[in-house]
Amino acid sequence: MTIRKGDTVKVITGKDRGKTGKVLRSVPEKSRVVVEKVNMAKKAMRPTQVNPQGGISTIEAPIHVSNVMLVCPSCGEATRVARRRDEGKLVRVCKKCGKDIPAAE
């Protein structure tokens, strides 16, 4: 996957199309990412010692990685990502401006 934790992404399809947010976590086994304030779902919480009231809370649900595009930090546009080998390491490259995309973590 070319999208990693800490990247800024833009949702390109679905109910949250057009929203941008930071990737909170990625699940490469299922090709999904959890994006901040995107794909909010309600979850029923049981009463626990930490949360004695219980109730319904809203959390970010995972979204498929094909539904988001990486936002290039240098040009600020949603872009596809190329990969180039540089001194033995794979470096992500913006397809629009051609500049390297640094690791976000």
Image (cartoon, rainbow, N blue to C red):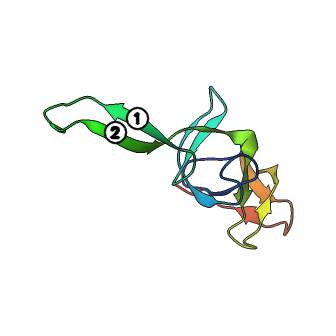
Q: Residues within 10 Å of mark 1 (few under 14, many from 20)?
A: few
Q: Quadrant of residue 74?
A: bottom right
Quarter of the picture holding the N terminus: top right
The residue closer to the viewer here, 8 or 85, is: 8
The residue closer to the viewer here, 28 or 15, is: 15
Residue 56's disc number = 2
Q: Is residue 1 visible?
A: no
Q: Amino acid at mark 1?
A: Lys
Q: Quadrant of residue 76?
A: bottom right
In the figure, 71 relative to 87: above or below? below
The residue closer to the viewer here, 79 or 11, is: 11
Q: Amino acid at mark 2?
A: Ile
For label 1, the SS is: strand
Tags 1 and 2 touching, CB below 8 Å:
yes
The residue closer to the viewer here, 44 or 38, is: 44
Residue at the spot 82% in from the left edge and 54% down from the top edge: 80
Q: Residues within 10 Å of mark 2 (few under 14, many from 20)?
A: few
Q: Which residue is label 1 attached to? A: 43
Give left or right: position of 19 versus 42.
right
For label 2, the SS is: strand
